[in-house]
Amino acid sequence: MTSRFLVSALFAGALAGVIIGLLQLVFVQPVLLHAELYESGELVHFGAEAVSAHPVLPGFDLMRDGLSVIFTMLTYTGYALIMVAAMSFGEDRGARIDGRWGILWGVAGFVAFHLAPGFTLAPEVPGVAAADVALRQVWWFATVIAACVALWLLAFGHNWAAWGAAALLLAAPHLIGAPEPESFTGPVPTEIGALFAARALGVGLVAWVLLGSFAGYFWQREGEHAAQAV
Amino acid sequence: MRNLKQVVGCDGKEMTMTTMTAKSLTASRFVPAIFAAVLGIALITLTGHVQAAALHDAAHDVRHATGFPCH
């Protein structure tokens, strides 16, 4: 049984991870590299001269971008392991798990792991002012856990008490607030910051839909293989 | 009149058997599910959150693009 979890998560995570890694290189990385020109001081926003919005960006870097793809695969394999664990609990409660229903699980994963923390701690371009990273990580984990519990209650709860608790859990981290910096010192133009957040969330949604669908497909397929083997 | 249960070779216990199979299936995969979830959390902690310099530098772009708090 353990192998069903590991095999389906590895296939789903690695496959989704490669696609997402490439999507990030195409859509997110240029914005990040653009921001780094301001972070390093090579470009200065509101300096003496107006700065072109279309600078020459560094090209493909095999080591840097290769590592990015590998770490994207690892990250989404981690997410896939959590996903198939959640799917097995859902299946025990009567949920159907396959490639199509996996899309819905993927959207839920996006909301829990990307949109919920990003609602207050927006995806950051390099160089933005931010509070202590350890404090933000605590807030990130707390928000993600609260959102996971909330979505589970929305999906599998049967009464208004469960749904009300879910709404509270979704809102609470943002009402309490995330650790924020003392002052704003980011040198990056707001246009780049906004584009980066939009791109990160957009690619994130595609990423999670793929991951959910793949995880559902491989989970079902590995289950059929196991049933045939018996 | 023949008893239907005898005709199909069932004695009513098959109901409990099915329930037991479902329950033992749930139990048998509870531990692997927890194991998978813990492994997954460990993996995203490593790729997304540990601040060790080498890991941070290698995963830098991914952490930003995935919305993790980075530095």
Image (cartoon, coloured by chain):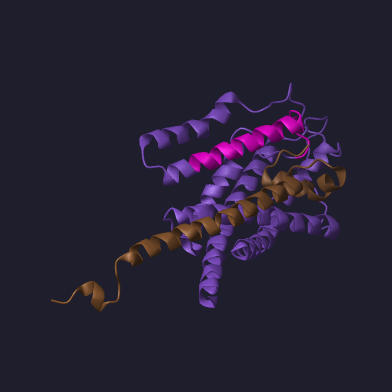
- Relative to B2, A222 lies left or right: right
Q: Position of residue A71 (x, y in %)?
A: 75, 54
Q: Is residue A143 magenta?
A: yes
Q: Quadrant of residue A15?
A: bottom right
Residue A175 drawn at (x, y percent): 55, 25
**Where are the magenta residues, as a range?**
A126-151
The chain coloured brown is B
Q: Quadrant of the N terminus of chain A?
A: bottom right
Classify A52 as above or below A183: below
Q: Is residue A51 above or below residue B25?
A: above
Colour purple belongs to chain: A
- Tell me if residue A84 is in the magenta stretch: no
Instruction: Identify the residue at horizontal 53%, vertical 68% (top origin).
Output: A223
How far across and how far down the image is residue A99, in percent? 50, 64
Q: Is residue A27 visible?
A: no
Please tell me how many numbered marks the rendered image carries. Answer: 0
Instruction: Indicate the quadrant where residue A12 lies.
Output: bottom right
- Taking depth in this image into account, of B36 and B12 the one nearest to the observer is B12
Task: Please tell me which residue lies in front, A145 or B16.
Answer: B16
User: Looking at the picture, how far across and down is residue B13, in whole percent?
Assistant: 33, 65
Task: Decide if residue B51 is on the left or right side of residue A165.
Answer: right
Q: Residue furthest left?
A: B1
Q: Is residue B22 visible?
A: yes
